[in-house]
Image (spheres, rainbow, N blue to C red):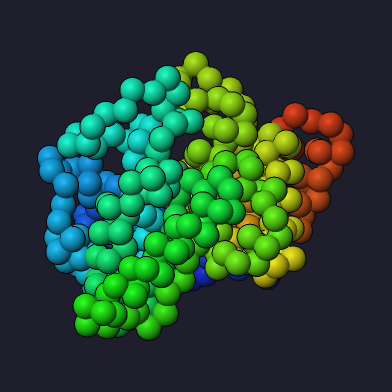
Amino acid sequence: AQERYASLREKPAKARCGSVVALHMNAGLMADLPSLDGSGAEGVGLFRTELQFLVRNQMPTRTELANLYKRVLAAAKGKRVVFRTLDIGSDKVLPYMKRQDEPNPALGWRAIRVGLDKPGVLRMQLQALIRAADGGPLTVMFPFIAQYEEYTAAKAELDKALERETILGHPLPSTVEVGAMLETPSLGFAPTKFFQEVEFLSIGGNDLKQFFFAADRENERVRRRYDTLNVSFLSYLEMVVERCKETGTPLSFCGEDAGRPVEAVCFAAMGLRTLSMRPASIGPVKHLICRVDLDEARAVIDAARDRGEMSVRRAVSDWLRTLP
Ligand code: PEP
Ligand code: MG
């Protein structure tokens, strides 16, 4: 199937209206990296660092982590890699960490909450990332930021790690880009100052959808109950896009839905111009984006919203069928 899209590999995802959508890939293991060339991804929009912790039976050391991140950056050959700091808890439990008994793990002590309350592992990871950058650029993203202060506190940890590494004589990264994942609806309503301060935002649609509709992403009974193209969800995305535009904050979408062509077109039509997805989705998504006019897509979406439809899926699918 990848071969079918091979001719598109070197081409941008340029819609008929002229807008270009940047397509990046999600990764988490060394084995994912070769796909960076094969898929035509512009970079790694989400590197899930917890996968490295989950495949081991003991906590990695700082040196092991630094070597691993170095190999990731070497394999990326200068393309941008967004390292998301450890996102554990909820569905991702480390076998060598004491299990927390929580009634609602998805709403519990996870991701940056663990990182800020017990900063040992986060600090080690940040130092390893700085060492791996070895004087080159570094991009770090903090998961599950629900309020402004969590971002500020996480960024302060990064600043401390940079100081510590300087004292230890390690070279500092040439540039450090720091961003947050928007995975809880609350963050979209954060003060404007947050949007001004954060250097980029990436929407974690898997978690965002789970909390937006209060529907467990792991529960087969409810996980497909609410459509991603539900007008309420799209209107929320629209608001986030607008707020980011006002402050000039780069915004991307890195949940699984970005890899579904119809969803990708709708997100792009709502103004999201950077999407990150599993490598095999890049070809099909690019293929569809190149066939559409995003302004037309937006008009179809707006008309469905005006008609009071629950989801724009039917209207968009009908319109896509009329394309040459
Ligand atoms: C998300 O929540 O959309 C996301 C990208 O992170 P994960 O799937 O790893 O929770
Ligand atoms: Mg998530």
- Furthest toward the right, the residue is 306
Q: Position of residue 94 (x, y in %)?
A: 24, 37
Please state the horizontal and vertical placement of residue 202, each as a whole percent of the image. 53, 55
In this picture, is 204 found above or below 79? above
Q: Residue at x 29, y 72 (%)?
A: 164
Q: Is residue 76 at least partly visible in the picture?
A: no
The answer to whether residue 107 shows anywhere in this view is yes
The part of the image, by quadrant, that contains residue 225 is top right
| Residue farthest top in this picture | 221
Front residue of 119 and 177 = 119
Q: Is residue 167 above or below residue 189?
A: below
Q: Position of residue 161 (x, y in %)?
A: 33, 68
Residue drawn at (38%, 32%), measured in percent from left and top?
90
**In the displayed structure, does residue 232 sit left or right of residue 291?**
right
Q: On screen, 71 above or below 239?
A: below
Is residue 159 toward the left or the right of residue 197 in the image?
left
In x, y percent, where is residue 166?
29, 80
- Residue at (27% x, 75% y) in the render: 165
Horizontal arrangement in the rendering, residue 109 relative to residue 53 (left or right):
right
Is 286 situated left or right of 92 in this image? Answer: right
